[in-house]
Image (spheres, coloured by chain):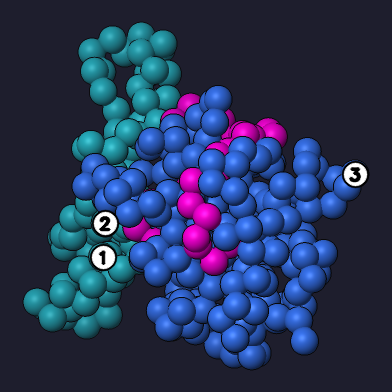
Chain colours: A cyan, B blue
Amino acid sequence: MARVVVDVMLKSEILDPQGKAVERAAQRLGYSTIASVRQGKRFELEIDGPVDDAALARIRELAQSLLANTVIEDFTVRVEDN
Amino acid sequence: MSSRIGVVTFPGSLDDRDAQRAIAIAGGEPVALWHGTTNLSGIDAVVLPGGFSYGDYLRAGAIARFSPIMSSVIDAAKSGMPVFGICNGFQVLCESHLLPGALTRNDHLHFICRDQKLRIENTTSAFTSGFDTNQEIVIPLKNGEGSYIADERTLDELEATGRIIARYVDVNPNGSRRDIAGITNEAGNVVGLMPHPEHAVEAGFGPSLDGLAFFTSVLSTLVNAS
């Protein structure tokens, strides 16, 4: 069964308070070279049948309507090798 | 005959009963609506209440937006039915694209619960017609994801067309752009508000009775339209 991964990230111009909190914690722990942290979401979709262009188009449709809110978020879709 | 105003209960809604109570106190007939039906039961207007529909999983309001009742609510809103989204309901309206922009996590990450001063700037929408222009009110605010965000062009357009119905006064509690607490659509029938008017409608409970005018406004709107 093929796996398709959808990554969703807040757009770069949108403030990410959760990422900022993680960033501050990392610096407090001494990871001084970590300059910035942004937090996102990863969805792993197990797909029945072939992952062809039509299947990927359907997944992009789902990402656009449900998995991401494109007002504030960007997403990427990729097929993961087994 | 009093107007029938539906209140949708999603799994995780918290303030549906308070919204029903506010409608009754205002003189309307509250009608409980279940998220799993598409039947609007002959209502004249609808309230999407506060709470944590579907546990706020994915994004606040994102899963509720695809519940069966919302397909009917979206159709009704587009044909002019008054729709009022409070807090989580506001998030559902943004996710449904009935209102522009989005509500994101408070900039300071804390959940805020306080009595909040607001200025009512639009007195023509279905839910704010009973206020005086620039009237200041105090009602409860309680949210973790109440920071209103839209691109600059959308914000400019909201300002230019008078669609910001209420702004935070004295303190911006969550990082909302331009102190926005609530907005309306172009037609004025769909209104979203982050603070909670339904908790300020009865003497002895809440900081004021200022919330009642949102509910009496829509009852007047419906009477004038009929």
The three-letter code of the residue at mark 3 reads Gly
Q: Quadrant of residue B120?
A: top right
Q: How many marks?
A: 3
**How far apart are the alpha carbons under marks 3 and 2?**
43 Å
Residue at the left extreme, as displayed: A53
Marking on residue A64: 1
Q: Quadrant of residue B75?
A: bottom left
The residue nearer to you, when weighing B164 against B140, is B164
Q: Position of residue B60 (x, y in %)?
A: 49, 54
Element at badge 2?
loop
- Residue ID at (41%, 11%): A28
Q: Position of residue B174 (x, y in %)?
A: 50, 33
Element at badge 3?
loop
Q: Which residues are magenta?
A: B99-127
**How far apart are the alpha carbons under marks 3 and 1?**
46 Å
- Cβ atoms under marks 1 and 2 closer than 8 Å: yes
- Residue ID at (50%, 60%): B124
Q: In the rendered image of this protein, does residue B70 appear above or below residue B13?
A: below
Left of B75 or right of it: where is B9?
Answer: right
Left of B64 or right of it: where is A18?
Answer: left
Task: From the image, tell me which residue sits under label 3.
Answer: B204
What chain letter is assigned to the residue under label 2? A
**How far apart are the alpha carbons under marks 1 and 2?**
7 Å
- Residue ID at (55%, 88%): B38
Task: From the image, tell me which residue sits under label 2.
Answer: A70
* Nearest-to-viewer mark from 3 and 2: 3
The three-letter code of the residue at mark 1 reads Gln
Element at badge 1?
helix
